[in-house]
Amino acid sequence: MNWILLSIVSAILLGFYDGAKKWSVRGNAVPIVLLLTVSIGALIYLPLIIWSHWDPDSIGWKFFVVQPLSWERHALIAAKSILVGASWTFAFTALKHLPLSIGAPIRATSPLWTILIAILFFGERPAPLQWLGIAVVLIGFWRFTLVGRREGIQFTRNRSVTWMVLATLLGACCSIYDKWLLQYAAFPPVTLQAWFTLYLVPVMLPLACWWYWNDSPQRLGRHGQNFQWRHSIALVSPLLIVADLFYFDALSDPDAMISIVSVLRRCSVVIALGFGAKALSEANFRAKAACVAVILVGVVLLTWKS
């Protein structure tokens, strides 16, 4: 099915996004990195929003026209931006202290919560073989917790793990909200993404201001957290925008099941594992690769029936 292919492409791009994100926050001031990444995303979409407002007929591909919205529909998108902003804040902060090859798999457990919500509130019923695939994928994610112990990461006591779990729960809620916005509220994918990206800037701005007044070197001298510009910061938003474009397009298909799309999307952990091992020299590559192999088996089962 077309929505499955779109979900897989989104997952690949999301893996590179995870790598750029980890490189950007490593030993860096997270609030400023967040503000810069969302501002770059807003600058990408702002010309399209203006163009669509003044001369939408001149845009050759109507898919990229940002549709006019009522104030009520703008409020729905603003709510999504607040939800995502909170999730990203927890995730970026956690990823600063966790190995990418541990943090990404924790983030990837969001399908578990997404599936439960989708079954309870949307009446989704995956086929038996898909249930088996979901179970296998989640077992692979669970195995990562055992590998994490070898690196001294106690999942029940580590504060960064707690932050990543909170980010994951918020991300699962956002996936369900995305399904509602695209399939029930009938938002066009580009319109949703353009305004959502723009609204992320005022959502992230207070956190950056808080950092300046509380943790920056200007306020605390040598004890403050320095900000360092890295080229990877400029890649974070473009990678996410393209990944989300494929994701929103997949999810706008009436036949798309969020319980399947979310699992496929989180298989970006395969790319994150490779980046963590090669670029960041993270440990236990073989054990983590075995976990990823289990995940891939689950993905095959998921897509076989579809």
Image: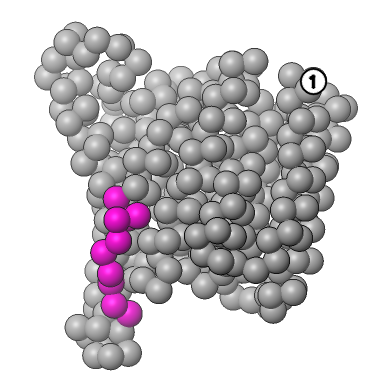
* Side of 78 where 133 appears, left or right: right
Q: Nearer the viewer, residue 288 or 2?
A: 288
Q: Is residue 230 magenta?
A: yes
Label 1: which secondary element: helix
Q: Nearer the viewer, residue 169 or 153?
A: 153
Occupied quadrant, residue 57: top left
Q: Position of residue 69 (x, y in %)?
A: 29, 24
Q: Is residue 145 above or below residue 4?
A: below
Q: Is residue 230 above or below residue 28?
A: above
- The structure residue drawn at horizontal position 12% and vertical position 19%, both measured from the top left corner, is 54
**Main SS, magenta residues:** loop
Residue wearing tag 1 = 305
Q: Is residue 13 left or right of residue 296?
A: left
Q: State the residue at coordinates (65%, 55%).
A: 105
Query: Which residue is at the front of the view, 191 or 153?
Result: 153
User: Which residue is located at x 16 percent, y 23 percent?
Assistant: 51
| Residue 11 percent location from the top left of the image | 56, 37
Q: Write the residue at 59% across / 16% down.
A: 2
In the rendered structure, which segment of residues is drawn in magenta? 225-234
Asked if one can make out residue 175 in the rendered structure from this viewpoint, the answer is yes
Q: Position of residue 299 (x, y in %)?
A: 74, 34
Q: In which quadrant of the rendered image does the N terminus lie?
A: top right
Q: Is residue 183 visible?
A: no
Image vertical order of residue 162 relative to residue 263, above or below: below
Q: Is residue 198 above or below residue 279?
A: above
Disc 1 crowd, CA 10 A, few/some/many (<14, 14-19, 20+) = few
Say which of 248 and 137 sits in front: 137
In this view, which residue lies farthest toward the left? Answer: 54
